[in-house]
């Protein structure tokens, strides 16, 4: 059973770069797509983007100019960076595996979430 | 439109049936997936595909899709079902992922 464990800095200053990594345990990073989702305090879920096992990435158009995703097959983990953060980027960030068979698609499992706070 | 619309809040009496809906043009192409999220926890998939439940999800949860609307039905709601529910699917380009705004379910 695949499990995801994520880590990264939890407190950033405005204009800094957010960096998070998600480790894949109990399965291979190959053959699936891997997403990042965030949730501002008290609000809903927002998809940030995804990267597949070939390294091809899709990003939320609203964040595309600031986000980069990558994966490291040798370490069985994937990462995201979000540049020039502001207070509006304060959120719990989740990693998740994307899977499905058209016309179905889903995210499962999810990481435990990391709260990232942007404050001066 | 690349949006999924959900009612912000719904309530149901204990033991009664409740339907939570999700509307969007992309649901004409893709099935919705439904997630349950309790405070302080990561979302958990409860319905996926045409109407499938992951292992461990009670059979009181069911899903349906018709036109541009997907529905999550809880038949005989329990106190532990009180949570936020989100729908999700890919957009019609296939390159992006959408989430509904979420529905907060209160069990009275």
Image: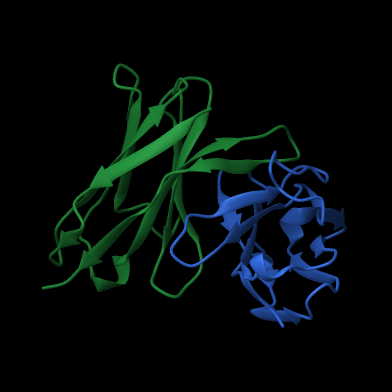
Chain colours: A green, B blue
Residue A31 in view here: yes
Q: Please tell me whether residue A50 is drawn above or below residue A45 in the rendered image.
A: above
Q: Please tell me whether residue A77 is drawn above or below residue A39 in the rendered image.
A: above
User: What's the residue at 32%, 42% (across, down)?
Assistant: A6
Relative to A100, is A59 on the left or the right?
left
Q: Which of the 4 image quarters holds residue B12?
A: bottom right
Q: Position of residue A109 (x, y in %)?
A: 53, 40
User: What's the residue at 40%, 49% (across, down)?
Assistant: A112
Residue B44 versus residue A37: which sits nearer the camera? B44
User: What's the residue at 39%, 72% (across, down)?
Assistant: A41
Relative to B104, is A12 on the left or the right?
left
Q: Position of residue A42 (x, y in %)?
A: 44, 75
Q: Residue furthest right?
A: B66
Q: What is the number of callouts on the image?
A: 0
Residue B78 versus residue B33: which sits nearer the camera? B78
Q: Identify the image quadrant of the C terminus of chain A.
A: bottom left
Residue A58 in view here: no
Q: Which of the 4 image quarters holds residue A16?
A: bottom left
Q: Position of residue A9 (x, y in %)?
A: 18, 52
Residue A7 versus residue B61: which sits nearer the camera? B61
Q: Residue furthest top?
A: A74
Q: Which of the 4 image quarters holds residue B101?
A: bottom right
């Amino acid at each position: 059973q695949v499990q995801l464990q994520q880590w990264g800095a939890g407190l950033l200053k405005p204009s800094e770069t957010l960096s998070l990594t998600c480790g894949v345990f109990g399965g291979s990073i190959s053959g699936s797509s891997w997403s990042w989702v965030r949730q501002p305090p008290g609000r809903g879920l927002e998809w940030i983007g995804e990267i597949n096992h070939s390294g091809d990435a899709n990003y939320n158009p609203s964040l595309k100019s600031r986000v980069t995703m990558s994966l490291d097959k040798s370490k069985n983990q994937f990462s995201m960076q979000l540049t020039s953060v502001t207070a509006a980027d304060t959120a719990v960030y989740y990693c998740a595996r994307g899977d499905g068979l058209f016309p179905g698609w889903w995210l499962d499992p999810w990481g435990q979430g990391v709260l990232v706070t942007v404050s001066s | 439109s690349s949006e999924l619309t959900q009612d912000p809040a719904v309530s149901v009496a204990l033991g009664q049936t409740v339907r939570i809906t999700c509307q969007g043009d992309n649901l004409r192409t893709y099935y919705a997936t439904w997630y349950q999220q309790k405070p302080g926890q990561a979302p958990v998939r409860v319905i996926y595909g045409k109407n499938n439940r992951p292992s461990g999800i009670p059979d009181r949860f069911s899903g349906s899709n018709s036109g541009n609307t997907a529905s999550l039905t809880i038949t005989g709601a329990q106190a532990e079902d009180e949570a936020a529910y989100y729908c999700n699917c890919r957009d019609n380009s296939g390159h992006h992922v959408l989430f509904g705004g979420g529905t907060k379910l209160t069990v009275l």
